[in-house]
Each structure stands twice: as C-alpha cells, then as structure tokens.
Image (tube, rainbow, N blue to C red):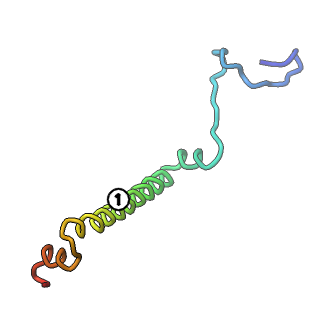
Amino acid sequence: MTTLGHGLRTAPTLGTASVPVRRRARGLLAAVTGNPYLQLLVTLVLIAAGATLLMIGVGLVLNVTVPWIFDDELRALRALLPQIG
C-alpha cells in the first residue's frame, strides 16, 4: 500500500489479505521466547524458586504444629526421633 503514489510504503492495515501482518514483540520477553536455552533457564529458575518456597512453607508449618501438638520441643524431638533421646 503506497501513499498517494509517492512510493512510500506504509504499514499494512489489519484487513488487507495481500500482506500478512507480522508483529514483533520487543523486550526481555521476546528474547526469552525466541531462544530455547533462555526458555529452559527461566523454567529451571521458576522451578527452583517454587521448590524453595515450598521448603520454607513446610518448615514453617512443622515449626508451628509440632510444638503445638507435643507441648514441648524437646518432648517432640524425643517422640519423633527415639534413637536420639
């Protein structure tokens, strides 16, 4: 599509079928989606972050519930690990 016959090319409109519309994303997300190694790295980082948060959550839950159930931390350790006490 030209502008008034001057030979200047303009961006195709969305309705024209003669020129396919191709939009390129910019920024970090475009770099990640275009590179499979970066996709793998981002996936591994997200899995590691999720595992870390899960581990911290389980530790906090155990830290709160075990003394609450057994009333005393030393008694809880003796009950959970009889070979030590």
In which quadrant is the C terminus drawn? Answer: bottom left
In x, y percent, where is residue 32?
54, 49
**Residue 46 image offset from top left, x and y in percent:** 44, 55
Q: Residue at x 23, y 67 (%)?
A: 66
Name which residue lies at 66% across and 15% down.
15
Above or below residue 24? Residue 17 is above
Residue at position x 42%, y 59% in the image: 49
Residue 60 appears left or right of 15: left
Horizontal side of 23 relative to 67 (left or right) equals right
Please state which of residues 48 and 71 is positioned toward the viewer in this rendering.
71
Q: Nearer the viewer, residue 65 or 44?
A: 65
In this view, the residue farthest toward the bottom is 85
Q: Give the x, y percent position of residue 63.
A: 29, 68
User: From the viewer's perspective, is 22 left or right of 72?
Assistant: right
Q: Which residue type does callout 1 highlight?
A: Leu
Which residue shows up at 24% across the image and 66% down it?
A: 68
Q: Residue furthest front?
A: 71
Q: Secondary structure at mark 1?
A: helix
Q: Which residue is mark 1?
A: 54
Q: For this rendering, which residue is in front, 3 or 65?
A: 65
Identify the image quadrant of residue 6.
top right
Q: Quadrant of the N terminus?
A: top right
Q: Is residue 19 above or below residue 69?
A: above
